[in-house]
Image (cartoon, rainbow, N blue to C red):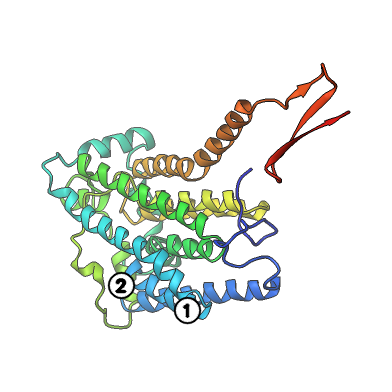
Amino acid sequence: MPETLAGAGVDVSAGANSGWQAGNHSQLARRFVIVGFVLYLAGVTAFILAHGRFPTVDYLVPALFLFAILMGRGRSFFIDWAPFVIILLAYEQARGLADTFSYKVHDQDLIEYEAALFGSPIPTLRLQEWLYTPGHVMPWDVLAALFYMLHFVTPVGVGFWIWTRDRRLYWRYILGFLGMCYAGFATYVFYPAMPPWLAARVGLLPPVHNVFGVVLRDFTPFEPFYTVYENIDHNVVAAMPSLHVAFPIFIAMTLIHLTSGRVRWLALLYPVFVTLSVVYLGHHYVIDGIAGLVYALVFYWLTWMMPEQAGRLWARLREARQPPRSVIPEVGYTLDGLEAAGEAQVRPR
């Protein structure tokens, strides 16, 4: 039976790893904390966006550390989250080096695959033709840019939510998430892929508008500040698979797995909106998103399904290997194991 988290009427794993035990806090207090956490994370994200920066883990996680201190869990937060931040930053640095290997960058072939599957002009060009108005920032432009910039906000926010309830499940979530990152990195090394905006810049596609840049320019009233990511080399040919699509799918499937109720299926809308956004912005082809879907489903299975299936199989094997209860019918006695007392007793029927 799948493990579930507290909240929305589901069970929580017992033991020292549980964040908030049932009965220790009222349901109303728990809801206030959840609302406070969401508002706090939204405020931090808005502050970062207003200064023209991408919300990255080097700002999000320290901000959540303050929230953990208010919960009285600052020490355990540092122990659990410091490895995640270090390993993720190492991945980002490695991803920037992936394009230094001498592998052919795929460009025209991706355009041909996209056109073969979805027709010509390709979806990015069609979406921009339908939706983009040069010189005007439309509401859907802002929404697309916002969904794009939630790339780290949502994984960190969901990870923190899981961590407050069950540290053991948090570690499974983080290991699956980081595994997906490094699988993507391996693909970027051996299969560098040019995104639509870059293909347009080198003349392989008609012009692709920089919608994201226009939105960022019009909605950043403050001067940018320093982030760790400024020292990381960014890989412009790391488009296949799209982790911008893979992350939301992995997160949506995780939420569906760990919670109950029909409303949980609404989580599937998030990856749909993100996929439309990254294609509209010209940062990915649809086929990049399809590859991201495959990666997300594989690591969802490795993270949540495989351990539970292996546990059930191991339980069946142990049960099959246990000897049957000893019965001695010839003399009219039965042998009952008294494990609690650590001895055996023979008594007449």
Residue 328, can we see it? yes
Mark toward the start of the polypeptide (2 vs 1): 2
- Mark 2 vs mark 1: give the one in front: 1
- How would you rate the neighbour count of disc 1 (Cα within 10 Å): few for under 14, some for 14-19, many for 20 or more? some
Give the alpha-carbon distance from disc 2 to disc 1, as whole Å.
26 Å
106 sits left or right of 42 in the view: left
Label 2 amino acid? Arg
82 sits left or right of 225 in the view: right
Label 1 amino acid? Ile
Quarter of the rendering occupied by the N terminus: top right
112 sits left or right of 249 in the view: left
Viewer-closest of 229 and 132: 229
Label 1 SS: helix
Q: Which mark is residue 53?
A: 2
Q: Residue furthest top?
A: 330
Residue 135, can we see it? no
Give the image quarter of residue 66.
bottom left
Residue depicted at x 40% and y 48%: 246
Identify whether 246 is placed above or below 136.
Answer: above
Percent x, y for residue 21? 64, 66
155 sits left or right of 281 in the view: right
